[in-house]
Amino acid sequence: MLLVYTHKVTPRLTYTFKHFFTRILNIPVSFTTKVEEFIAHNDLKLSYTKQPLGKEIFIRSNDLLFEQGINDIEIHIGEWDDTTCFFQSRQEATIPFDVFAATFYLVSRYEEYLPHVKDQFGRFSAEESLAFKHKFLEKPLIDIWAYKFKLILKEKFPDHKFTEREFKYISTIDVDNAYNYKRKGVVRTIGGYFNDLTKLRVLDLWYRTLVLLGFRQDPFDTYDELLDFQKQYNIKTLFFFSVGDYTTYDKNISSRNTKYRSLIKSIADYADVGLHPSYFTMKNEEILKKEKLRLENILNRPVTKSRQHYLRLDMPETYQSLVNLEVNEDFTMGYAAHYGFRAGTCTSFYFYDLDYEIQTPLKIYPFAVMDITLRDYLELSNKRAYEVILKLAQEVKNVDGTFITLFHNDTLSNKGRWRRWKKLYIDIFKQLSIL
């Protein structure tokens, strides 16, 4: 067990140290404000305060973990060896910055509470983030800091036996549109035919007709293949289903459709299923509650996992709603227009509510990359997209973290802009299953 001496134990401090040491490094941690207890401790220990007690591992504390509320903080970027750092210390310490204040700043999403310009969909954009501005978005910086700190602990306490963690990969699938042609209803089907005709899309007309007559499989019906890949490569796959009402931004088939309900139930027999809350749930708890109940009625069990449609996340309101509705796990933490680590970590963490200064029961699983980011926002070639995904995976592997990708069921359709992406998905599974 690691004992931390500090002049004051706060919720921010315990939250940060437990993420850094317990969740990343598998080291239990406890705290003391008594010097004699710290001196008597014979195992791992460090002091986190303004002045060292002796020759122990000492991190000079910034005030951030002892404050309450939000303040406009001036950040100066520096370097720790070859790694980006901030909250530098002017006094002598074991490392030249307050790694714990920096960790809290990133993982609490402190910067998302500060004034910022939102994108066209009301989201906090990558360009507004410290990580993007200073070019460390593509690295799980907190985990890198933790692993470097572990080397310091090993040197100071050579007899201590450390527990290692293992690299994991989770593939997540958002189902925005369950089918391309099927189950759309009479009005939408006629509208689809009319749209194809006016735009002279003869091939789409032909495919649509073949699918509706049952002579061809709907191109978005890739669920059996996704489940087969999960089994073949032994890689965990999660599905997030949309059950919201039809809007400009939510165009899935009706949650009342019996075939769609059967599809959700059948997927849930072989993989974990979560809610994909619709566009307007970001700031509307009532709509979110209604959709959660819909999915629970389909599954006949509680829904505990969620990812927001369009990745629309407003800190802290969206997460507060999920907490109120007893959703335990959220997978929204990532950017739409850029790949990388939005919270600076590839390790799941609990949502810390800066409004109330408490750690909540909501566990956040940050994803590193989304298919639409690579294909639509950044317009990368298939080869370049593949290289980006594997590079991110290697960054996570270097710190034995959890690598999470976001794909859609239609990505494997090999149709239109997703041509040859099925092969890319399979190649990724092959590579990551042996990492």
Image (cartoon, rainbow, N blue to C red):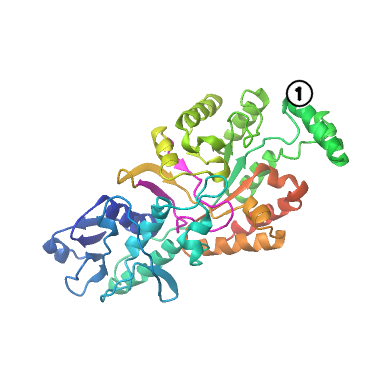
Closer to the camera in the image, 66 or 59: 66
Res 73 seen here: yes
Percent x, y of residue 424: 69, 55
Percent x, y of residue 415: 77, 46
- Picture layout, residue 360 above or below residue 166: above
Lateral position of residue 225 relative to residue 300, left or right: right
- The reply to whether the magenta stretch includes residue 354 is no
- The residue sitting at the left extreme is 36
Residue depicted at x 64% and y 44%: 408
Provide the residue designation for mark 1: 186
Lateral position of residue 230 relative to residue 423, left or right: left
Closer to the camera in the image, 331 or 187: 187
Residue depicted at x 61% and y 59%: 389
**What amino acid is labelled 1 in the image?**
Val
Q: Which residues are magenta?
A: 327-353
Lateral position of residue 405 relative to residue 192, left or right: left
Closer to the camera in the image, 433 or 338: 338
User: In which quadrant will I find the N terminus?
Assistant: bottom left
Overall secondary structure of the magenta stretch? loop
Residue depicted at x 47% and y 56%: 346
Percent x, y of residue 301: 49, 28
Percent x, y of residue 283: 47, 37
SS at badge 1: helix
- Say which quarter of the image contains residue 435: bottom right
- The reply to whether the magenta stretch includes residue 341 is yes
